[in-house]
Image (cartoon, helix red, strand yellow):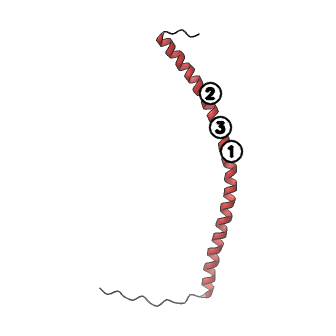
């Protein structure tokens, strides 16, 4: 099966060419400015989330300590060991 030749390339209007380049460059500029805006905003969000994580870790450590003491007391009672 022989390949059919492609039609000759047509000239694109300078106005259309200018509009394409303008759209491309404005999209790049918008992307850069939007990225910088969101990056600055994310720093504040990360600080807040880190504070929440630290509070959660502290609460979990306290709760784990309480649970461990209760479990040891229950184990001691089952084993017949008198707590001090």
The span from disc 2 to disc 3 (Cα, nearest Å) is 13 Å
Q: Residue at left 62%, top 79%?
A: 21
Earlier residue among tags 1 and 2: 1
**Which residue in the protein does label 1 denote?**
48
**Quadrant assignment, res 62:** top right
Tell me the residue that label 2 is attached to.
62
Residue sitting nearer the eye, 12 or 60? 60
Residue appearing at x 69%, y 59% in the figure: 37
Eye-nearest disc, 3 or 1: 3
- Residue found farthest to the left: 1
> Seen in the image, is 20 located left or right of residue 9?
right
Q: Which mark is residue 54?
A: 3
Using a 10 Å C-alpha cutoff, classify the residue at mark 3 as few (fewer than 14 neighbours), some (14 to 19) or many (20 or more).
few
Q: Position of residue 3 (x, y in %)?
A: 35, 86
Name the residue: 59% across, 23% down.
66
The mark that comes first in sequence, 2 or 3, is 3
- The answer to whether 21 is drawn above or below residue 54 in the figure is below
Q: Secondary structure at mark 2?
A: helix
| Image location (x, y in percent) of residue 11 | 54, 90
Q: Position of residue 1 (x, y in %)?
A: 29, 85
């Amino acid at each position: 099966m022989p390949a059919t030749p492609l039609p000759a390339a047509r000239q694109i209007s300078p106005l259309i060419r200018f509009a394409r380049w303008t759209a491309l460059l404005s999209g790049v500029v918008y992307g850069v400015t939007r990225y910088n805006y969101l990056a600055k905003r994310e720093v504040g969000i990360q600080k807040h989330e880190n504070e929440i994580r630290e509070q959660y870790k502290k609460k979990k450590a306290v709760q784990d300590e309480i649970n461990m003491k209760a479990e040891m007391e229950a184990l001691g009672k089952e084993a017949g060991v008198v707590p001090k």
